Amino acid sequence: MSFPWAAHYAPKNPFMRWMDEKLPLPRLVYNAVGAGYPVPRNLNYFWNFGVLAGAALGIQIITGVILAMHYAANGTVAFDSVEHIMRDVNSGWLLRYAHANGASFFFIVVYMHIFRGLYYGSYKAPREMVWLLGVVIFLLMMATAFMGYVLPWGQMSFWGAQVITGFFSAIPIVGEPIRMWLLGGFAPDNDALNRFFSLHYLLPFVIAAVIVLHIWALHLPGSNNPTGVAVQGPEDTVPFHPYYTAKDGFGLGVFLICFSLMVFFAPNALGHPDNYIPANPLSTPAHIVPEWYFLPFYAILKSFTANFLGVPAKLWGVMAMFGAILLLFFLPWIDRSPIRSGNYRPVYKKLFWVLVADVLLLGYLGQAEVTPTVVLLSQLCAGYYFAHFLILIPLIAKFETPLPLPNSISESVLHGEAAEAAPYGTATA
Amino acid sequence: MLRFFAPWIAPLVGALFVCSLLWAVVMSPHAPAIHLASEEFHLQPKAIHYSFEGPLGRYDNQQLQRGFQVYKEVCSACHSMRLVAFRDLEQIGFNKPEVKALAKGWATETPSLNPDTGEAATRKSLPSDYLPGPYPNEIAARAGNNNALPPDMSLLAKAREGGPAYIASLVTGYADVPADLKKKFPDFNVPPGLHYNPYFANLNIAMPPPLTSDGQVTYADGTKATRMQMATDVSAFLMWAAEPKLENRKRTGIAVVGYLVIATLLAFAAYRNIWHGKKH
Ligand code: HEM
């Protein structure tokens, strides 16, 4: 693991020495996020988002565990138990608003993290496994957030569950039985609510476990960097601590400020008013929309409006929606270009920004009222999404002429200045 | 074999999805969009300013008490407020004896059991009771309102787009059907038992105008009870009912954000200090 010039853990304090012999946990921390982990010296702020995602998970688990002490997963009382948290539990409003907005911020930072990976080619060899585990985390997050949103048992909770589990009924023959098996009934009810709560409590800890694997897999090759050029020597790296602990500390502060502004001053801005109406199976809301972080995929789902090749439109939509995420699993092998960083790939760089605009537009279209223009735009944007990953990326990997790469990270940072050529971050520095 | 085919899999799958979408574009019905009266004549809520807006906003207890009076004397005839207890009213400035008297004199009593026979009965409310609604159940509520259901008011201000401003606009927004609308949409009509109101999404609402004249309630603090004043006061009160912890939240927020800004500046200084002289 890690580079030969990584600092070695050598505790001076007798207690820490004793600890190191009996249970080398401090050694693990030292090697994972301490001075024993050499990191490229040129990481920019986009490399903050992994740590921030971990912080967001921490916030969700802490607030969630306390919420669960006051929440009751039963259709007759779930809505009122959430209001009990809001009104009677000490600082319950804070826990609940932090948890609800925490989910949104979790997705914001994870989306930044994913797009960082796309731009800088972090999914490419030798980090394929890191990427694969990341996509697994993303899927688990989506499942967790979906089931969490059902728990307050408001109108959007209920109808969201109805719509999303309804995707399964698009599968021919076995679809409807699968849907009923998942829900434990014909429609979402106590059985569904209870199992969703059980899974909503479980999955975050599964996510935490996959994060451990994700970081483990990352630490074999080490972090990618904005040039995409591999680390070659000690002059290319700095030890994680104190360099990146300091930078991540600053990033965490900015994150918490943004998060607090939402929690304390606009806690319902990202929510839907209908979820303050208790679930009512007999009254369908005028517009059923999922949480904002699902909107691009929701827009893709809705854009398949015609039967094609004997496959019904609804099934196309469901396949496309899942396909839009699952294709990320294959990305390391779809993109055959050996150049990682978008900085040195003129064509890829442009298409990357088109993709960002495309996904943002899909997000907007996902919540817009369905008009012919909205449908047409969704179809074009969904088409671009698939074309980008499945057609354009393999094509440009073949035909693009990359810009000249720097010889090394330190060369790109120092621009030939000799002043700082002395190695940094070595065991002795 | 696989080596030869593998590079074609992704483009083929991509082409399949793209073709399906192109086919959907070709097949999409080009019927002109149906134009609805509710799209053209629906109004956005009026611009109303409340004391609790903004990061430093606070409730105005005088206003909340007036609003409570409107709720008690007008809206509570049809709308329940099941998540608010009488004792909660102490938070908006009523004292304990006042709350006790309010509970005791409430128009409907709290459901209970006859201690001797076990039969359903009612009793006078206590400060710890939640406000009893006007109807024993949904069927009774619908029966009393032309089959429409007056929604519970505890969370109403958070359960509608536009919040309190929407509520105030709605209850003062009743009007005659504009001549314009009749001309453009001859099929539009107001079914019996419904009332035209351009602030309501589909323009016809089952609630009869609740605030019909100025001076409908007599405010104890001498404020002139115009219809707009009553509407603004009751909507402010409904915001409090939906978000009683708002002041506490904003106050905490100022302290938390202040603390975080200082901590973040220090973290930034530490970061610059540690990286000082190191090109990156
Ligand atoms: C991956 C991390 C998590 C995500 C993304 C997440 C997401 C969500 C979301 C979106 C809601 C609905 C919020 C609302 O509208 O009120 C929710 C509710 C809830 N979550 Fe989580 N959650 C996570 C972790 C946890 C954990 C670890 C627990 C408990 C151990 C938990 C317990 C609860 C409870 C009790 C509720 C219902 C109360 C409420 O609605 O506020 N969550 N969650």
Image: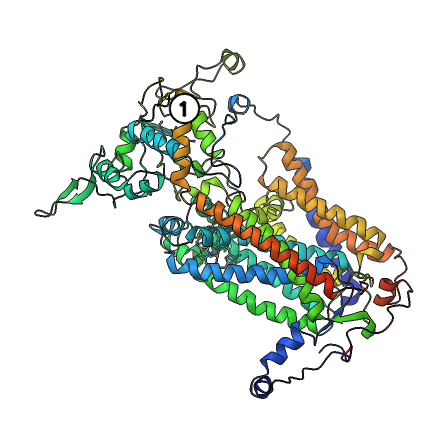
In this rendering, the answer to whether A38 lies above or below B96 is below
For this orientation, the residue located farthest to the left is: B116
In this rendering, the answer to whether A28 lies above or below A297 is below
Q: Residue at x 27, y 36 (%)?
A: B133
User: Which amino acid type is shown beneath numbered disc 1?
Assistant: Gln
On-image quarter of the C terminus of chain A: bottom right
- Front residue of B156/A420: it is A420
On-image quarter of the N terminus of chain A: bottom right
- Front residue of A302/A412: it is A412
For label 1, the crowd category at 10 Å Cα-Cα, with few meaning under 14, some 14 to 19 and many 20 or more, is: some
Structure colour scheme: rainbow
Q: Position of residue B73 (x, y in %)?
A: 29, 27
Write down the quadrant of residue B97 in the picture. top left
In this rendering, the answer to whether A246 lies above or below A172 is below
- Front residue of B269/A86: it is B269
In this rendering, the answer to whether A36 lies above or below B154 is below
Report if residue B111 is visible in the image. yes
Q: Position of residue B99 (x, y in %)?
A: 26, 39
Q: Residue at x 43, y 62 (%)?
A: A198
Q: Position of residue B7 (x, y in %)?
A: 78, 60
Q: Position of residue A383 (x, y in %)?
A: 70, 45
Q: Residue at x 74, y 49 (%)?
A: A387
Write down the quadrant of residue B197 in the picture. top left
- Front residue of A92/A391: it is A92
Report if residue A184 is visible in the image. no
SS for tag 1? helix
Residue identifier under label 1: B229
Q: Chain of mark 1?
A: B
